[in-house]
Image (cartoon, rainbow, N blue to C red):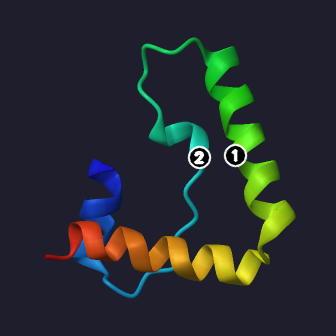
Amino acid sequence: MKLYRQIRERNPNAKLVMHMHNAFEPELPDKERHQIAEKAKYLVFSKYSWENVAQRFEEQMKSWFDK
């Protein structure tokens, strides 16, 4: 999340892609992080379009860090 904040500070309009497995604590074994990320990706994309997911995620991230 620190990297996201740094990118936003330098270029607020940058298009970003963040991977779900990077959001989890490093204490989790790599295999568990990968499995959790894959399940999250499957769940999200089975219910929502990519464009909507990307837009909503970016809006949410901005609301957290652009205060």
- Cβ atoms under marks 2 and 1 closer than 8 Å: yes
- Residue 39: x, y in percent? 76, 39
Q: Please rate how many residues cluster around mark 2, counting C-alpha atoms within 10 Å: few if below 14, some from 14 to 19, many from 20.
A: some
Q: Residue at x 76, y 75 (%)?
A: 50
Q: Residue at x 65, y 73 (%)?
A: 53
Residue 58 placement, left or right of 41: left
Above or below for 1 versus 23: below
Going by the numbered disc 1, the residue's amino acid type is Ala
65 vs 11, nearest the viewer: 65
- Residue 28: x, y in percent? 51, 15
Query: Which quadrant of the figure has residue 26?
Result: top left
Marks counted in the figure total 2
Numbered badge on residue 20: 2
- Residue that sits furthest to the front in the current view: 47
24 vs 48, nearest the viewer: 48
Numbered badge on residue 30: none
Above or below for 66 versus 43: below
Q: Residue at x 23, y 67 (%)?
A: 65
Q: Residue at x 77, y 52 (%)?
A: 43
Inter-mark Cα distance, 2 to 1: 8 Å
- Residue 5: x, y in percent? 26, 62
Numbered badge on residue 40: 1
Going by the numbered disc 2, the residue's amino acid type is Met
Disc 1 secondary structure class: helix
- Residue 17: x, y in percent? 58, 64
Residue 20 placement, left or right of 43: left
Above or below for 18 versus 39: below
Foreground tag (2 vs 1) = 1
Of pointers 2 and 1, the one earlier in the residue sequence? 2
Q: Please rate how many residues cluster around mark 1, counting C-alpha atoms within 10 Å: few if below 14, some from 14 to 19, many from 20.
A: some
